[in-house]
Image: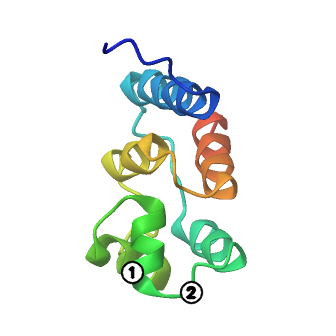
Amino acid sequence: MGDKIPSVTSAKRVTARLESLEFQQQPISRDRKVPTRPIANALIKAGYLSLDAQAKALGVSRSTAWTIVNTKQKLGRLNNKTARCILANPNAPASVHVIIRTMLDRKN
């Protein structure tokens, strides 16, 4: 009856989501800074040119995407909560994930 076998792609999505949740639950120290400019550049290179597309790709609101792309944030870096939100979004471009993880893994 309800014994539907999940497809390989759905299993991959679930695995990716679980991995991102594990990473999301790890504390991000305050001294780790993720600058917004490389993320904005990666979005544009990936073909996300409109604000709506960028917000959807990052999994954040339009106003947050606008702040990231236009680098109007006074500190010039992502909030830890925003970084976690982007990493938890499986639809975010791989280049953005790489930038955020690299910056978080870097020792200051």
Check the picture and name the quadrant holding the N terminus. Answer: top left
Instruction: Estimate the spatial distance between the alpha carbons at disc 1 and disc 2, rounded to whole Å.
Output: 9 Å
Circle on res. 49:
2
Residue at 66 percent of width and 79 percent of height = 47
Residue 33 visible to the viewer: yes
Residue beneath disc 1: 52
Location of residue 29 with respect to 41 vertically, above or below: above
Q: Position of residue 86 (x, y in %)?
A: 44, 51
Q: Quadrant of residue 27?
A: top left
Q: Are marks 1 and 2 in contact (CB under 8 Å)?
A: no
Q: Position of residue 17 (x, y in %)?
A: 47, 31
Q: Position of residue 28 (x, y in %)?
A: 42, 32
Q: Quadrant of residue 35?
A: bottom right
Check the picture and name the quadrant holding the C terminus. Answer: top right
Q: Position of residue 63 (x, y in %)?
A: 27, 77
Q: Amino acid at mark 1?
A: Asp
Residue at 58 percent of width and 78 percent of height = 48
Q: In the image shown, does 65 or 59 lie closer to the viewer?
A: 59
Q: Residues within 10 Å of mark 1 (few under 14, many from 20)?
A: some
Q: Amino acid at mark 2?
A: Leu
Residue at 58 percent of width and 73 percent of height = 37
Q: Residues within 10 Å of mark 2 (few under 14, many from 20)?
A: few
